[in-house]
Amino acid sequence: MSQQVVEYSAEQISDANKAAVTMEALIGRLSHDEDFAAHLANNAREALEASDMLMEKEAIQVLMAVDPERFDKLCEALFDLVDSDFLHTMSAPSCA
């Protein structure tokens, strides 16, 4: 079975790193800012946009491919802060 090697541009990798940093900031903010967490729960897209924390789907996909361990750790940290229903609600508009 052949394995396909996907190469990403420096810009794509940079965007993936920015997405990871954004996820880290989101985790930090959720950890201590109850108003932000409430706003995020009520209108995730608006809260993320207002906080300059919107992430591009492609950047997340590249992050998953180039640094899966980091992505998994970030997701685990998010799951510790919010429930799975909330994460589904938050990501649903971007997955359509």
Image: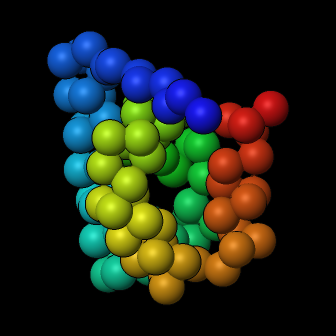
Residue 34: horizontal and vertical position, in percent?
Answer: 44, 79
Q: Quick check: can you spot residue 32?
A: yes
Instruction: Determine whether, in the image, residue 66 is placed left or right of residue 83.
Output: left
Q: Which of 7 and 59 is in front in this view?
A: 7
Residue 75: horizontal and vertical position, in percent?
Answer: 47, 67
Instruction: Determine whether, in the image, residue 12 is placed left or right of residue 96.
Output: left
Quadrant of the image occupied by residue 71: bottom left
Vertical order, 43 against 54 (above or below)? below
Vertical order, 75 against 33 (above or below)? above
Vertical order, 19 against 13 (above or below)? below
Q: Quick check: can you spot residue 55?
A: no
- Outermost residue to the bottom: 80
Identity of the residue drawn at 19% across and 18% down: 10
Instruction: Determine whether, in the image, residue 69 is placed left or right of residue 50.
Output: left
Residue 37: horizontal and vertical position, in percent?
Answer: 50, 71
Q: Which of 46 and 60 is in front in this view?
A: 60
Query: What scheme was used to colour the molecule?
Result: rainbow
Tell me the quadrant of the picture where the N terminus can be found.
top right
Identity of the residue drawn at 41% across and 25% down: 5
Identity of the residue drawn at 21% across and 28% down: 14
Vertical order, 29 against 64 (above or below)? below
- Outermost residue to the front: 1
Identity of the residue drawn at 33% across and 19% down: 7
Quadrant of the image occupied by residue 30: bottom left
Quadrant of the image occupied by residue 27: bottom left
